């Protein structure tokens, strides 16, 4: 019978610093760690899901939001890489914020990221609707796609099936997840390279296409800048989740070295490959004035340029990418819930933090997260605007959670409290300027994403003020309501649960106090 490879002696040193004992099995190698980060970003999922929105909002020139978002998120990724080298533990966002800030900020960051992850599972799963009916009308189970609620309701049906799949796979342990994830990422990378080549040999116009605004700035208060800022949501949706490589740190071999590399490689690879897909799609589609570019997006481009046979084959690859992406998001959410529960920072923490002896993974949070993601879909079952609203709220929550890491990290740098891991990834003298840019970028983009624009949050009838202000209301309720619960209830119980503590306790108290650093 095969046994898991032993982990290097230093792999669990960071766990002891947090007061935890190792419980999750270390089976993931270098490529598995990279695959976790890039599958969450998922080039084919994000670009294919919101290209239609970016093009409709900003025309071909919206492409410039891609390098803009990359530049900002790369600064965040560099900060995260430094943190991953120092603290490669489960629930990266939560534990990082707790270490560079304090326990209260850490809880809020974890809470926001956990909510964002659950919303993101639903948002990613909705991408099935944008692809499956394009492959065959058989997958349009509700109506024929022309009714007022056909698309939204069918999207919920398809997405529910995907969420059930990710729940089952995540519950069966990290090995099965890693195998599916690795195979899916390998296929996605190959398919992306093939797509780039096929689009490149079919170009019909030059790269100057990215200067065409298609008149989208007309009627905007800020002219084309206003249109461009709206369209940038399409790029902002893709480039996040790179912290997942570190969130699986307790299941990875040599995580303090592999995780930082995986974070940087994942975002750089996504930028290069995704940017080429987008610009070549604009250069190769038969017409830039077709209505379907603003409704069917890249799915239409692929079928238009490659034809029905090769085009549908490529869409199957997109479907696999969406599946793997949803699985990666679900897995990261489970690790975050486990990390918070281990500190007794969630209701019923002892049960949520229990790791299955048979499968080596927390089963209960896996199921609960799947159920909550399904609930988000069900309450929106007859909402035609479900795609952009759910996606936008998910992105806003992520950017806020990231700010709750980079912000406290900047304060720690300014106070001289931040020390990178010796002999491992470090920004050195560039740390402060990179951190400042990461915070400024995160704050500016959060404001841009949450701004109550009808084009994003209430683009079609019926028009209601609460829909337009939906992101502000939802994010505000999650932040204020969640932290109020923590402050008045949960913070009085905070501490490492005895069964998860690094040192066995003899007294009957179940908790070990957590002291913010």
Image (tube, grey):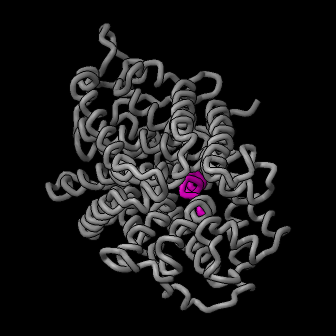
Locate the C terminus and report the quarter of the image it occupies. Answer: top left
Residue 128 drawn above or below residue 286: above
Observer able to see residue 498: yes
Residue 358 drawn above or below residue 219: above
**Residue 307 lies in quadrant:** bottom right
Q: Residue furthest top?
A: 508
Q: Position of residue 93 (x, y in %)?
A: 38, 45
Q: Position of residue 158 (x, y in %)?
A: 68, 43
Q: Position of residue 497 (x, y in %)?
A: 37, 21
Q: How many marks?
A: 0
Residue in the image at 57% along x and 40% along y: 381
Q: Position of 38 compared to 420: left or right?
A: right
Locate the N terminus and report the quarter of the image it occupies. Answer: top right
- Magenta includes 42? yes
Observer able to see residue 431: no
Q: Position of residue 465 (x, y in %)?
A: 34, 50
Q: Position of 102 compared to 125: left or right?
A: left
Query: Of residues 182 and 481, which is closer to you in this image?
Result: 481
**Residue 428 lies in quadrant:** bottom left
**Residue 133 lies in quadrant:** bottom right
Q: Which residues are magenta?
A: 34-43
Residue in the image at 52% along x and 85% along y: 210
Chief secondary structure of the magenta span? helix
Residue in the image at 40% along x and 64% along y: 73
Q: Residue furthest left?
A: 415
- Magenta includes 414? no
Residue 271 drawn above or below residue 506: below
Residue in the image at 51% along x and 32% along y: 372
């Amino acid at each position: 019978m095969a046994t898991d490879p032993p982990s290097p002696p230093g792999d669990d040193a960071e766990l002891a610093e947090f007061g935890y004992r190792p419980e999750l099995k270390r089976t993931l190698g270098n490529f598995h760690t990279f695959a976790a980060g890039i599958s969450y970003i998922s080039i084919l999922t994000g670009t294919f899901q919101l290209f239609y929105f970016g093009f409709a909002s900003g025309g071909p020139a919206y492409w410039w939001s891609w390098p803009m978002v990359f530049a900002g998120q790369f600064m965040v990724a560099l900060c995260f890489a430094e943190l991953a080298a120092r603290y490669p533990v489960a629930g990266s966002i939560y534990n990082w914020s707790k270490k560079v800030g304090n326990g209260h900020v850490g809880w809020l960051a974890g809470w926001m990221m956990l909510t964002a992850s659950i919303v993101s599972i639903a948002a990613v799963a909705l991408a099935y609707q944008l692809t499956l009916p394009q492959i065959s009308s058989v997958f349009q189970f509700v109506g024929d796609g022309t009714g007022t609620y056909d698309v939204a309701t069918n999207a919920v049906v398809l997405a529910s099936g995907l969420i059930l799949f990710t729940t089952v796979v995540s519950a069966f342990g990290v090995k099965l997840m890693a195998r599916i994830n690795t195979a899916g990422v390998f296929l996605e990378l190959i398919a992306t390279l093939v797509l780039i080549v096929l689009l490149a040999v079919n170009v019909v116009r030059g790269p100057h296409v990215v200067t065409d605004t298609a008149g989208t700035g007309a009627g905007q208060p800020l002219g084309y800048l206003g249109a461009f800022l709206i369209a940038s949501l399409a790029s902002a949706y893709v480039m996040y989740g790179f912290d997942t490589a570190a969130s699986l740190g307790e299941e990875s071999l040599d995580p303090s070295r592999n995780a930082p590399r995986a974070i940087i490689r994942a975002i750089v690879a996504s930028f290069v490959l995704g940017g080429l897909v987008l610009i070549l799609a604009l250069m190769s589609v038969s017409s830039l004035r077709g209505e379907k570019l603003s409704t069917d997006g890249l799915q239409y481009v692929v079928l238009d340029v490659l034809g029905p046979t090769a085009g549908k084959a490529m869409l199957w690859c997109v479907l696999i990418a969406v599946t793997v992406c949803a699985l990666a998001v679900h897995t990261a959410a489970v690790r975050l819930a486990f990390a918070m529960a281990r500190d007794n920072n969630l209701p019923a923490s002892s049960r949520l933090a229990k790791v299955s002896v048979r499968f080596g993974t927390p089963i209960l949070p896996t199921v609960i997260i799947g159920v909550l993601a399904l609930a988000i879909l069900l309450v929106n079952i007859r909402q035609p605007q479900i795609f952009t609203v759910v996606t936008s709220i998910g992105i806003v929550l992520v950017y806020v959670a990231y700010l709750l890491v980079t912000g406290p990290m900047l304060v720690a740098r300014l106070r001289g409290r931040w020390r990178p891991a010796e002999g491992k990834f470090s920004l050195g003298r560039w740390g402060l300027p990179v951190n400042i840019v990461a915070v400024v970028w995160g704050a500016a983009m959060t404001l841009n994403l949450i701004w109550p624009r009808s084009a994003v949050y209430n683009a079609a009838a019926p028009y209601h003020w609460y829909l337009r202000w939906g992101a502000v209301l939802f994010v505000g309720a999650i932040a204020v309501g969640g932290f109020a619960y923590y402050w008045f209830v949960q913070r009085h119980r905070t501490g490492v649960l005895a069964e998860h503590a690094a040192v066995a306790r003899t007294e009957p108290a179940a908790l070990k106090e957590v002291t913010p650093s």
